[in-house]
Amino acid sequence: MAKRQERHQKKLDNKTKKQKKKASRKKLAKSTKISLSILAVMILLIITGTIFFFQKYGKEVTAAIDAGEEHAAKIQESDFKQHHPTTILDKNGQTIKELKTQERDYLTYKKMDPLVSQALISIEDKRFYEHHGVDTQGLLTIALNAATGKGVRGASTITQQLVKNIYLTPEVSISRKVEEMVMAQALEKRFTKHQILEYYLNNVYFGHGAYGINAAAKVYFGQSINDTSLLEKATLIGVTNNPGIFDPTTNKQNALKRAKLILKEMNAQGYITNKQYEKAVADDFTAKIHSNALNNQLDSNEVALAVDSAAKVLMGQQDFRFQYQFDSKEEEERYNKEYKVAYNKVYQRIISGGYQISTNIDTALHDQLQSILSNTMNAWQDRGENSLYTKQAAMTVIDNQTGNVVASIGGRGEEGNNYNRAFLSYRQPGSAIKPLVSYAPAYERGLLETTTVSDDRPNSTYPNNVYNASKGNLTLRNALAISSNVVAYKLAEENRTELKEPIYQPLAQMQFTGLDVGDDNPIIAVGGMTYGATTQEMASGIATLVNQGNYRAPLNINTIKRKDTGQEIFTQDDLTQQKIYSDDAAYLTIDTMKAVHQNADGTAASLNLAHNQYWAVKTGTTDEAKDLWTVGATPYYTVAVWAGDDTPQPQDNASVGQATKEIFKQTMDLLNNGKEDVDFQMPASVQKVDNQLVTRSSQTKQVLETRKNALQAATANIDTLAKQKANELTAAKLNTPMVEEASTFSNQLISERIDTLSQLEIIVTDTQDNWQIFDQYAQQVFTLIQQVEPSGGSLSDQYTNVYRNKEVEYAHEKAERNSELNTIKSQISEAKTQSKDLDKQISELKKQLDEARD
């Protein structure tokens, strides 16, 4: 009995096993089907995305790979780890500043608390130890984003971020992303994972001038990174994502929230225990800026300019595309954001060490010029809350022979006044801008100093003159001398129309960095800019006029060398000049500026230089005299002086305006003492005829004007004669030889006009449609035909045939354009549908994955 039960139980067990195995197979089959379905869709998506990606970006990707490999070959350890402080040398080769922030604060991986790199990996790159510089999942994300029109987006690995921080500009594009990936993989072959973490943590920017985690810990918490709490470490790692948004001193709640997210990830990934996590999230921190933590204070105006100039040079070498004019506010804001990131990155490299920057800084001359400015401004002693003088001044001096900045005086020189207003402070230039945006472009189009323009205001949109009146018709020379706002406004408006370019175009070409999309307005001719200009920009603009219209970037550096290799990576010979104005337009503008001090009613009539009779000048005064300027040049030097309050306030024009003139005078007298008194070089395209300067541009304009007038007169004569002959023809009823002659002439003239009609091209685009112009001209021809053939005839038939053909042509062009638009709309609609289908597929995938996990 027992044996029978045992056999029965065995049968039951076997049956149960078979049932379980069968159920398991069913379950496995179902799971396998789901997995295979998901895999198939993923492969399909990858293939589709890859085909799209390479069809659209194939050539761009190939070029980027080549560029990445070329840059990767130049990677050196010293790019990340500088042991040589950056030194700034004066014109005699003497060191005037040594910068060595990184040398002091650099921490090797072995000496750094492991929690720091673990915090970084947990939030920025979870698979850091698994990939070889590029995360393949990230690649798929980028391809899918590009294919679905969501831009070039995808998470970068820590290695990629290091490459981008050190070598690349912040441009967002397929080519830049591919180049970044190529270099990241090369970096991983060259260095260990620990080295890469070390380089990243010692080079990333943390805000407030702090580069590197150790420097950041000292700036925010007043101690080394190893001495900070776990919460503080997480907070600092959080800052790297966006130093503005997660600044622990100004946005503590944001910083704390991100720090707790990092701690949560560290706990989930096993870097810290539950006990460590709970203690850290219950903790708090107090952050404040410890300004004495860094040794990178640029307390010399000239050194600050040298570092700024070097940063822009290095940005250019990294292919950063500088931009000075924009089509929209959005484009302007995007550029400004990219510029700030790129500038900060390069600035960090210079401050961290590794460069020798040779300059033309003459400290003795700077001190003399600083004394001139400071002493002249001593009449105003009021100070603000920051203990700085309320009333400030700034000045830039440029050597016209070389284009170099000789001096950059950023303020009155009191203790603690390190802000260099000369190249950092944008102020409204007032009438000082007139030579650059009104007069030089006007001379470009052929006007002369003797050309007259009415000083009358046509309507209330025109600015008032400072003398609140009209002086009638003024020559351009007199108009600039007395600083007529109306004439300058009219010239700017005409320049835009005739030259077919934005009013601020010359300023953009001369790299004025404060331009705004709203500045294409004639009001900037009287200084009404959105942001304004710096003394350095104003000086470089006037220096361009002296240099026959050729712009040279205003720098005070001669060479830049890498200390680790001794390689000279920049020399002043690398700079190229850009033609902004024609030789004759530049010369005429400078000559016109002489009238500002030569004419009895000129705004600088009381100003005299001790060593020069050949010099040019322009004063500038804004509304309520908030900003006061004197800018001008001798053949040797250009000087631009500004005075006013840091926070714009109305000034006493008589006293503060006179101060700018006095600073200008004393500076010019010092610089030009002992130099030969010579005039500005007159180009061959300018000649003196009947005691006035005549230019090639003006002669060309006069020839064209004469031809235009002659053509108009001839056309008027033809029309008049045709009508006259036609009237005679009608009155005589075609019965005299004279009428036959007139008929022949009229018929020939009208036939030619019909022929002209037939040759006119009908244009229909999304921005152009010239049918109305054609039709108006056709009606004029038809009127003439009716006078000759009131009852119809061969001319009427010829005209009708041409007109109907043009109607057919217009209808065809219109239909084609509509068809193109419909095709584009259809493509857009189809793309949207495909995008929705793809989103549905991805959603279904996620659903199936969730079911498979369950």
Image: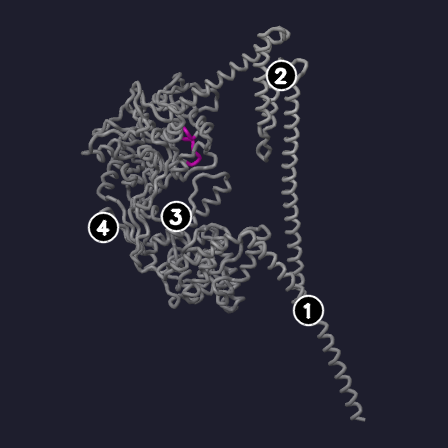
Q: Check disc 2 and report its element: helix, strand or loop.
A: helix
Give whichever of 465, 436 is nearer the camera: 436
Q: Check disc 1 and report its element: helix, strand or loop.
A: helix
Give whichever of 659, 683 is nearer the camera: 683
Residue 235 image point, x, y percent: 46, 58
Marks 1 and 3 sit apart, C-alpha to C-alpha, by: 56 Å
- Sequence-wise, the earlier of marks 3 and 4 is 4
Which quadrant holds the C terminus?
Answer: bottom right
- Residue 785 is tagged as 2
The kind of residue on which mark 1 rests is Ser
- Sequence-wise, the earlier of marks 2 and 1 is 1
Residue 650: in sight, yes or no?
Answer: no
Q: Check disc 4 and report its element: helix, strand or loop.
A: loop
Q: Magenta includes 378? A: no
Task: Evaluate if marks 4 and 2 touch, with contact meaning CB atoms under 8 Å apart.
Answer: no
Depicted 69 relative to depicted 585: above or below: below
- What's drawn in magenta, residue-wise? 524-531
- Sequence-wise, the earlier of marks 1 and 4 is 1
